[in-house]
Image (cartoon, grey):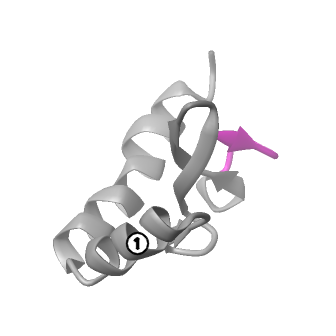
Amino acid sequence: CVFNSSELKDIQFIRSYCYNKLEFIRFDSNVGKFVGYTELGVKNAEIWNSNPSQIASERALRETYCLHNVGI
């Protein structure tokens, strides 16, 4: 979670997936979808982005995870 303030609209949720210290895919709440950075990441991003329930779940994490921890 990246906090610019305690308001939900200013909180950015990023979930990165790495292998051998190389980030290959990321969900960014500002973008609203998965973005791939390697050949495997791009293929996975296409599959994961085509599942509306997975995208909705990731978007909800900004509120359920980040907003809950803003005071810590």
Image quadrant containing the C terminus: top right
Tell me residue 66's x, y (percent).
52, 38
Magenta residue check for 35: no
- In what element is the residue under mark 1? helix
Q: Is residue 29 above or below residue 43?
A: above
Amino acid identity at mark 1: Ala
At horizontal 47% and vertical 64% (from top left) the residue drawn is: 41
Q: Residue at x 63, y 31 (%)?
A: 21
Decide whether the magenta segment is chiefly helix, strand or loop: loop
Residue 71 lies, in percent from the top left, at 63, 22
Q: Nearer the viewer, residue 30 or 10?
A: 30
Which of the 4 quarters of the picture holds residue 1?
top right
Name the residue: 61% across, 46% down: 23
| Residue at the disc numbered 1 | 45
Tell me which segment is drawn in magenta.
1-7
Q: Is residue 17 left or right of residue 4?
A: left
> In this rendering, would 9 be left or right of 26?
right
Please give left or right for residue 21 compared with residue 3 in the image: left
55 vs 13: above or below: below
Q: Is residue 49 shown above or below 16? A: below
Q: Position of residue 11 (x, y in %)?
A: 66, 51
Residue found 35% across the figure and 68% down from its top: 44
Q: Position of residue 24 (x, y in %)?
A: 55, 54
Residue ranking furthest to the top: 72
Specify the quadrant of the image occupied by residue 60: bottom left
